């Protein structure tokens, strides 16, 4: 490690085995362990802890008292050499904890342009894609998968192995134990389908035709009283087979935990 073109506070503890990019700022009392990588133009705020196995991209913000690449809270973990990977332009806010992987997948991954808010927890082997928001106090158990542009609001509890698909909006305080298909709103207690995430889809420049086609698929799935396999067959025969419809049907068919119920269930 060299200190050229870096701003490292004299009270920070930075291992000589850490790989530090250009124009990195490391604040007072921060800790950066060995076997860690911090990309160019990233800001490590005071008191943040970057542990062994961290791989942080460029232009990231790691806020005070957050812990990146902490040891997994999994009794099956036996000290394997694993990673916690954070993509470019991602912001990790205060007291968030992101554990590294276990032998199961070997890595915990957070994509690019994500916002992980304060006091949230991303457990071992989770996979979060790009443009995701995880709200304050939200807790993701091990091996949860979250697809792009999902918004998981504050205080949400996500069971291990759950899959949350793309362009989903989750109500704050939710308890998620089943998979959530793409493009929808979920909320209430117990958690149910509450319609399409129309605001999110329009922000992502989905056309009215695309939104109407998605809406028709979910009308068949949740409002016609069909079981899941019959609903899938009906969607495949009644709806134009657009990429959005294929995303919906393939996600449901691949679900191992079952999908969130509708209001009629």
Image (cartoon, rainbow, N blue to C red):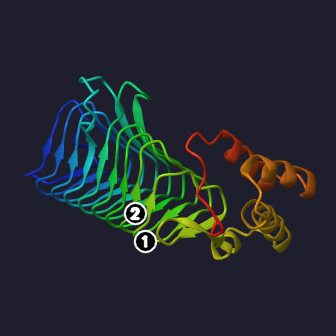
Relative to 102, does residue 117 appear above or below in the rendering?
A: below
Residue at point 57% right, 66% down? 192
Closer to us: 93 or 262: 262
Closer to us: 11 or 174: 174
- Tell me whether circle 1 and circle 2 mark residues in contact (CB < 8 Å): yes
Q: Is residue 247 among the parts visible in the rendering?
A: no
Residue at point 43% right, 42% down? 126
Disc 2 secondary structure class:
loop
Image location of residue 167, percent across then percent down: 62, 62
Picture quadrant of residue 47 = bottom left
Closer to us: 220 or 31: 220
- Label 1: how many residues lie within 10 Å, few (<14), some (14-19) or many (20+)? many
Residue, disc 2: 156
> How many callouts does the rendering have?
2
Image location of residue 158, percent across then percent down: 42, 54
Disc 1 secondary structure class:
loop
In-image side of 115 versus 51 (left or right): right
Q: Quadrant of the C terminus?
A: bottom right
- Label 2: how many residues lie within 10 Å, few (<14), some (14-19) or many (20+)? many
Image location of residue 101, percent across then percent down: 36, 34
Between marks 1 and 2, how big is the CA–CA gap?
6 Å
Residue at point 82% right, 70% down? 212
Residue at point 92% right, 51% down? 237
In-image side of 251 versus 133 (left or right): right
In-image side of 197 versus 132 (left or right): right
Relative to 162, does residue 64 appear above or below in the rendering?
A: below
Image location of residue 5, percent across then percent down: 28, 48
Residue, disc 1: 172
């Amino acid at each position: 490690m060299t200190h050229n073109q870096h701003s490292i506070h004299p009270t920070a503890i930075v291992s000589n085995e850490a790989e530090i990019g250009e124009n990195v700022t490391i604040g007072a009392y921060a800790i950066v362990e060995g076997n860690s990588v911090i990309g160019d133009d990233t800001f490590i705020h005071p008191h943040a802890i970057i542990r062994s196995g961290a791989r942080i991209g460029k232009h990231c913000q790691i806020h005070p008292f957050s812990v990146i690449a902490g040891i997994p809270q999994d009794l099956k973990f036996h000290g394997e050499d694993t990673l916690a990977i954070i993509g470019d332009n991602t912001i990790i806010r205060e007291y968030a904890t992101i554990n590294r992987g276990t032998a199961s997948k070997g890595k915990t991954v957070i994509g690019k342009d994500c916002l992980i808010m304060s006091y949230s927890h991303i457990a071992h082997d989770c996979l979060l894609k790009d443009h995701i928001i995880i709200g304050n106090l939200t807790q993701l158990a091990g091996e949860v998968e979250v697809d792009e542009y999902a918004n998981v609001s504050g205080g949400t509890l996500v069971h291990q192995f759950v899959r949350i698909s793309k362009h989903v909006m989750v109500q704050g305080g939710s308890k998620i134990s089943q998979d959530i298909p793409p493009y929808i709103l979920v909320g209430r207690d117990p958690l149910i389908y509450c319609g399409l995430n129309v605001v999110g889809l329009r922000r992502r420049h989905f056309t009215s035709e695309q939104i109407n086609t998605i809406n028709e698929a979910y009308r068949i799935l949740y409002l016609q009283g069909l079981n899941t396999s019959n609903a899938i067959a009906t969607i495949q025969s009644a709806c134009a087979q657009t990429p959005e419809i294929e995303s919906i049907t393939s996600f449901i068919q691949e679900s191992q935990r079952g999908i969130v119920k509708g209001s009629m269930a």
